[in-house]
Amino acid sequence: MPEAIAALFLGNHEALTGFTDAEAEQLVDLRKRLIENLGSDCKCAILGAALEARLGL
């Protein structure tokens, strides 16, 4: 799983290359709004995966 987490963070880094801090923050805010608008089942799956990634599980 560490390889998957490393790939995720590398992908995030590559995706944000060239963005200003303000633009990156806006993108994160938009993602949060999208997750909030999703159904609870989908939202739980996304948030659970993010938490697992953060905890290194």
Image: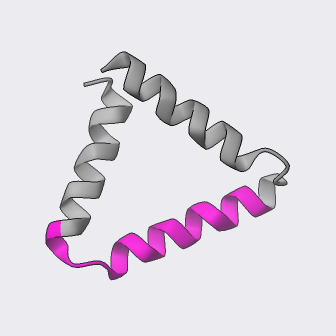
Please report the residue visible at 35 percent of the width from the left and 34 percent of the height from the top.
53
Which stretch is magenta?
23-41
Q: Camera-side residue: 33 or 3?
A: 3
Judge whether residue 42 is colored magenta. Answer: no
Q: Camera-side residue: 52 or 2?
A: 2
Please report the residue visible at 21 percent of the width from the left and 78 percent of the height from the top.
39
On the rendered image, what quadrant is the N terminus found in? top left
Q: Camera-side residue: 18 or 26?
A: 18
Q: Is residue 42 left or right of residue 1?
A: left
Q: Is residue 25 left or right of residue 22?
A: left
Find residue 44 and report its image quarter.
bottom left
- Above or below, comparing residue 28 to residue 57 in the picture: below
**SS assignment for the magenta stretch, majority:** helix
* Image spot of residue 38 (x, y percent): 29, 78
Furthest-bottom residue in this view: 37
On the rendered image, what quadrant is the C terminus found in? top left
* Image spot of residue 18 (x, y percent): 85, 49
Find residue 17 and report its image quarter.
top right
